[in-house]
C-alpha cells in the first residue's frame, strides 16, 4: 500500500480515529441453545454449605460469580480517624450442570468447606472478569488454583467493547441478560427470591458461555487458562507485567542502569526472551507497552509478526508499540489492520499511522538524572531532558558556591 493509499484510507476512516466504525466486524459462529433452568439452592447454614461442597467436589467444571456489598467507613484504631473498608463478599454463586448454589457469605463467616473445591487443580473454575472476584474470595480464604477468565477470552476474540457478559450472551446464545439489579444492595436480608434468581443467573449463563467458547474457540480459551504457576521472565521485567513497580518504567530502568544493575544489552536480551516465552495475551500486551516505554527501537522488527497475532490485544499492542517507536517500515502492514474485525485494533492502527505519517523521527523519551540543590538526585522523563541537564549544571555551581561560603 503506497503512502497515497494509506492517506486515503486514513481519510476514509475519519479524523483522529473519531469515525472508526465501532463493533466487531468479523464472522460469528452459530448461536448455541440457552440452558434450561436448573435447581437453585439457597445456602445459609453450615450444614447446607457442607452439602454444597460435597456436590461441587464431584464436578469437573464450576462457574463462579460473586456479589459484593458497598464499602463503608469504620472506626480506625487511632481515635478520630476513619478508614474505608473494601468491598465485602455478600453472595457466592457456584453453578454446575443442572444446579446453582447461592451462598450467603455474610451469614456464613466460615467458608472453609469450599477451600478444597477451589484449591483442587483438577477442577476448572470459570470466571467472567476474574480480578475482583479472585481478590474478594481470597480475603475469605478461598484461593482458586485453576481457572479460565471468560471475559479476557472474549476480549481477545471480539475486543474490549464486546467482551461483557451481557454482550457475549447476546452474541453466543441470543440471550438478553437482565442487569437491572446490578447495583442493588446485596447486604439486605432476607433476600427476595427475585434477587436470588438474578444472582444465580449470571453463574448459570457463565457456564453456558463456556460451552459455546469451548466449541468454537478452544485455542483462545487455552490462552486464558490460569494456574498457580507464574510465567517466568527476567526479575526486572516482572514489576511492569504485574503492576507492582512504584515508578514508571523509564525511571526504574534508568535508576537500575545508573547503579550498574542493568545494561542496554541485557535489557534487549531479556525483553526478546520474554517476548518468546510469555503465553498470556495480557502479559504479552504489557510487555509490548514496556518495549515502547523504554524506546527499544531495535526490537521493532521483532514486533512485526505480532501484527498477525491471533489475539486482539496483541495485534493492538504491537501496532501501538510500532507507532510509538516510529518504525516507518511497518506502515504498510499496519494499514492492513484498518480493516481488522476488532474495533480496538482498527483504532490503534489509525492512530499509529497518523503518528507515523506526521513525523519521520521516532519519539524520544528517556529518563535523565538531575541533581537537586540539597545534593540528592531526581529523575526527569521525556521532553524535559535538556532542562534537566541544564538544571543539573545550575544546581552544581550553586552547591559549590554554598560550600565556598560555608553554608
Image (cartoon, grey):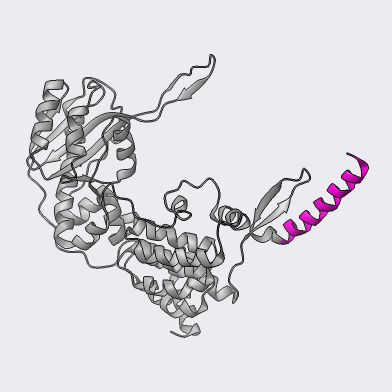
Q: Does the magenta stretch include residue 394?
A: yes
- Horizontal side of 296 relative to 118 (left or right) equals right
The secondary structure that dominates the magenta segment is helix
Is residue 253 placed above or below 72 in the rendered structure? below
Give percent across and percent down for residue 333.
Answer: 41, 78
Q: Which of 42 and 45 is in front in this view?
A: 45
Is residue 346 placed above or below 51 in the rendered structure? below
Q: What stretch is highlighted in magenta?
A: 386-407
- Residue 110 seen from this side: yes
Q: In which quarter of the image is residue 90?
A: top left
Is residue 127 placed above or below 218 in the rendered structure? above
- Residue 347 seen from this side: no
Q: Is residue 404 magenta?
A: yes
Q: Which of 372 and 25 is in front in this view?
A: 372
Q: Which of 241 and 218 is in front in this view?
A: 241
Q: In which quarter of the image is the C terminus?
A: top right
Q: Quadrant of the N terminus?
A: bottom left
Work out which residue is located at the far right of the displayed protein and give it: 405
Give percent across and percent down for residue 368.
Answer: 67, 58
Residue at left 77%, top 43%? 374
Is residue 203 placed above or below 7 in the rendered structure? above
Give percent across and percent down for residue 192.
Answer: 19, 25
Amino acid at each position: 500500500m503506497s503512502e497515497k493509499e494509506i492517506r486515503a484510507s486514513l481519510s476514509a476512516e475519519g479524523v483522529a480515529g473519531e469515525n472508526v466504525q465501532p463493533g466487531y466486524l468479523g464472522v460469528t459462529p452459530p448461536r448455541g441453545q440457552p440452558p434450561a433452568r436448573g435447581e437453585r439452592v439457597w445456602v445459609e447454614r453450615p450444614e447446607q454449605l457442607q452439602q454444597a461442597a460435597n456436590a461441587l467436589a464431584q464436578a469437573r467444571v464450576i462457574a463462579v460469580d460473586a456479589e459484593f456489598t458497598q464499602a463503608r467507613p469504620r472506626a480506625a484504631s487511632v481515635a478520630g480517624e476513619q478508614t474505608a473498608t473494601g468491598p465485602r463478599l455478600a453472595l457466592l454463586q457456584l453453578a454446575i450442570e443442572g444446579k446453582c448454589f447461592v451462598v450467603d457469605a455474610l451469614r456464613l463467616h466460615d467458608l472453609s468447606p469450599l477451600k478444597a473445591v477451589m484449591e483442587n487443580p483438577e477442577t476448572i473454575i470459570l470466571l467472567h472478569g476474574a480480578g475482583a472476584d479472585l481478590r474478594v474470595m481470597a480475603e475469605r480464604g478461598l484461593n482458586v488454583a485453576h481457572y479460565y477468565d471468560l471475559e479476557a477470552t472474549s476480549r481477545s476474540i471480539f475486543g474490549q467493547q464486546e467482551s461483557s457478559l451481557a454482550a457475549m450472551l447476546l452474541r453466543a446464545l441470543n440471550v438478553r441478560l437482565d442487569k437491572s439489579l446490578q447495583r442493588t444492595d446485596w447486604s439486605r436480608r432476607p433476600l427476595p427470591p427475585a434477587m436470588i434468581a438474578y444472582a444465580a443467573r449470571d453463574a448459570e449463563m457463565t457456564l453456558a458461555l463456556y460451552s459455546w467458547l469451548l466449541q468454537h474457540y478452544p485455542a483462545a480459551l487455552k490462552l486464558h487458562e490460569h494456574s498457580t504457576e507464574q510465567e517466568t521472565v527476567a526479575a526486572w521485567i516482572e514489576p511492569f507485567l504485574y503492576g507492582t513497580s512504584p515508578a514508571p518504567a523509564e525511571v526504574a530502568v534508568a535508576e537500575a542502569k545508573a547503579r550498574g544493575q542493568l545494561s542496554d544489552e541485557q535489557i534487549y536480551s531479556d525483553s526478546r526472551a520474554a517476548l518468546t516465552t510469555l503465553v498470556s495475551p495480557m502479559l504479552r500486551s504489557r510487555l509490548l507497552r514496556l518495549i515502547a516505554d523504554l524506546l527499544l527501537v531495535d526490537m521493532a522488527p521483532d514486533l512485526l509478526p505480532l501484527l498477525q497475532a491471533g489475539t486482539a490485544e496483541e495485534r493492538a499492542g504491537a501496532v501501538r508499540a510500532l507507532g510509538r517507536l516510529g518504525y516507518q517500515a511497518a506502515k504498510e502492514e499496519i494499514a492492513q489492520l484498518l480493516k481488522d474485525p476488532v474495533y480496538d485494533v482498527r483504532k490503534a492502527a489509525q492512530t499509529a499511522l497518523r503518528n507515523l505519517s506526521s513525523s519521520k523521527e521516532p519519539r524520544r523519551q528517556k529518563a535523565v538524572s538531575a541533581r537537586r540543590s540539597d545534593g540528592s538526585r531526581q529523575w526527569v522523563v521525556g521532553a524535559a531532558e535538556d532542562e534537566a541537564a541544564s538544571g543539573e549544571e545550575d544546581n552544581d555551581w550553586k552547591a559549590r558556591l554554598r560550600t565556598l561560603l560555608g553554608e
